[in-house]
Image: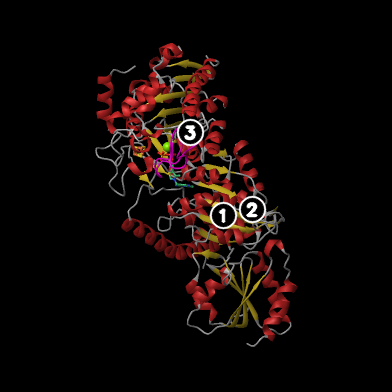
Amino acid sequence: MKSSRYQEEILMLDFSKVEIWTGNQAIAEAAILSRPEVIAAYPITPSTPIIEALSSAVENGRLDAEFIAVESEHAAMSGVMGGSAAGARTFTATASQGLLYMMEMIYWAGYGRLPIVIGLVNRSLAPGWSIWVDHQDAYSMRDAGWLQIFAKNNQEAHDLTVQAFKVAENHGVYLPMAVNIDGFVLSHVAGQVQPLTQKFVDDFLPSFNPIFKLDSSDPVSFGALTLPDDYQMLRKDLEDSFQRAKKVITDVSKEFAELTGRDWGDLIEVYGPESADIAVVAMGTLAEEAEEAVDELNKRGKNVGVVRIRSFRPFPTERIREVAKNYDKILIIDRGQSFGSATPLTLEFKNALYGTDIPIVTRVMGTGGKDVDYSEIMAVIEEVYKEEM
Amino acid sequence: MVSTKELVNIELEVKAIEKGNLACPGCQLNLSFKHALSALKGDAIVVVPACCTSVIQGAGQGYGMHVPIFNTAFASAPPVASGIARKLKRDGKKTTVVVWAGDGGTADIGFGSMSGAAERDENILYVMYDNQGYQNTGNQKSGATPRGAKTSTTPHGKKSRRKDIARMMMAQEVSYVATANASYPQDLFAKIERAATEFAGHFRFIQIYSPCPPGWNIDTKDSVLVGELANNTGYWPLYEAVNGKLEFSRPSRRFNDPAKRKPLADYLKIQGRFRNIDPEIVKQMEEDIEHEWSILRKFM
Ligand SMILES: Cc1ncc(C[n+]2csc(CCOP(=O)(O)OP(=O)(O)O)c2C)c(N)n1
Ligand code: SF4
Ligand SMILES: [Mg+2]
């Protein structure tokens, strides 16, 4: 059943060891194990502890890397871009306004095909000032050419960070990737995490093998003036890479699950009964909260499931079409908005399910850090039951 | 200092720029690039933010420069170069990482990021080629546009003084700061070489005066002459400042004496950008020259 490699890997992983880590620690520790060579970073709540941990790991010799304490987020993304273009594995972290300030370079890294990994600790956007979670920051980079994946707990954040490098640097993908966790709810709340070991990560994650890099003995130009035909071809290539990434993300998740026994799903995670009256759709911790809500309701004789979107980009359109058949109705709980239109997740579902007659209802919940517990999700599900099915 | 003949031979050998790139005729930024990259013997990685240099390389696969170039967004060149330099350090490579940026990219939008890289003392040779305006977008004023110059956003001549970036870098205690002038290639060559060897490992800053025929409204054939007059009128003092200690460079040295300087009018009259400007502004421009020298002298 399990390969001999699995047995070997078991030995590499010490399952008796459990740490109590915040989401930020879980990401930072995984980033350290992934051996990035260049880190450039700028502090912002709630992602600051990630970069502090990396900076001390470099300072105390635990991580053999360059840490560039830059003067802005724009420079942070620029710094990792330079490192990546010179052939280094690179990592940074930010949130909210930091991401917006970085945005010009976020696009540059995406369209420029630099496989950087960023820890994005989701936080709402000002004004008014709010340091608490929603997904509006992540939605702002939707079309920037970045893979975007969301964790539901600290363990998944830890595991995903290592997987992210493997996906991003895959030659068939070769795109930057954002690992998202909910601000404070995960970033600052400690929970059990089984740490990966250095031996495991070294084996699981091959060293970065750049397709192209800056080298004075082989002069190439990055990002020079590009005429319309070439430009369109490059963007088509970007889209093709996103399509290929669907399989790579799935394969890497599967490989990881086989080796560690920790299966977080593929592009989505389906929870609950095979087929149900309602599927609750959400990302991040809201999806985990929804799991509790449906458990409770199903105990009371309801029939509800959860479809958690793990990969927002690429969007799992085909998987959604596959699983949607199992539900009579879809309830999307979105932690962000697209003003003047449907919410970002709703737009994705309407696109994915175009031509089917599965009803979709949406609730915007938990923006600006508004606490959403499972009982509120239960109440919303009950409401949806009462509406015309 | 290299002789003219040696310089020409090195430039032919390095071929930093291929024939027929997209620079305008008489463009001095193009020549500055050739001189600078020849001084580095081509062993360089160049980071170019949005500016004329992003365009003159050529389009797509018709590529006109013979060094690796990372083209990047307007304000981002210094941190991009920092990332490259850090990786080269890990790989034990001696290649010089150059930021090749315009005056607008340096004095305005990229000032914070350059200042940040200087503060971290990144191993970068920062070259600000100074064509005194946003030329790529059609000659709007930049922070480095001099008093008096007409641009499309200062149609009657700029009223305020230019931001003096070289002096600001001295204030930041950058180990090597120099000014250069495209009309003095040997001096420019020597400064790049010195910065790249003697001060390797540190942040270095060189500002090159680079006339732009269309932006300055000068005759193509005059672009070298304008540079010469900038020197001989005392308008553009050439110097090197090593750890804050300043020395005037040979072509400029004797103009420390105001009596030796040519009249500013000689410089102004061959440039359309200064045509018909308010005599009051011209008077201030004349005063600006001695003002500049008097500040620089304090660092000798
Ligand atoms: C963020 C951003 N704002 C504006 C521009 C438009 N832009 C491109 S080049 C340029 C002027 C560059 O001036 P300078 O740095 O002096 O270089 P030059 O063109 O004179 O060589 C401007 C305003 C841009 N590319 N990016
Ligand atoms: S506009 Fe001026 S600086 Fe730009 S390429 Fe032409 S001459 Fe050179
Ligand atoms: Mg300019």
Whether residue A226 is in magenta: the answer is no
The residue drawn where x is 43% and y is 54% is: A111
Q: Nearer the viewer, residue B64 or B97?
A: B64
The residue drawn where x is 29% and y is 17% is: B3
Asked whether mark 3 lies closer than 8 Å to ligand 3, one says yes
Q: Chain of mark 2?
A: A
The residue drawn where x is 39% and y is 43% is: B136
Residue wearing tag 3 = B144
The residue drawn where x is 31% and y is 48% is: B59
Q: Quadrant of ligand 2?
A: top left
Residue wearing tag 1 = A161
Residue wearing tag 2 = A26
Most extreme residue toward the bottom is: A388
- The picture quadrant where one finds residue B5 is top left
Image coords of residue A102 (percent x, y): 55, 49
For label 1, the SS is: helix
Image coords of residue A286 (percent x, y): 66, 67
Indicate left or right for A51 with B132 as reference. Answer: right
Q: What is the chief secondary structure element of the magenta stretch?
A: loop
The stretch in magenta equals B133-156
Q: Nearer the viewer, residue A163 or B166?
A: B166
Q: Chain of mark 3?
A: B
Mark 2, residues whose alpha carbon is within 10 Å: few (<14), some, or many (≥20)?
many
Instruction: Tell me the quadrant of the picture where the N terminus of chain B can be found.
Output: top left
Q: Is residue A389 above or below residue A147?
A: below
For label 2, the SS is: helix
Q: Nearer the viewer, residue B115 or A37?
A: B115
Q: CA distance from mark 1 to mark 2?
A: 9 Å
Say whether marks 1 and 2 touch (CB < 8 Å).
Answer: yes
Mark 3, residues whose alpha carbon is within 10 Å: few (<14), some, or many (≥20)?
many
Q: Are marks 2 and 3 on the same chain?
A: no
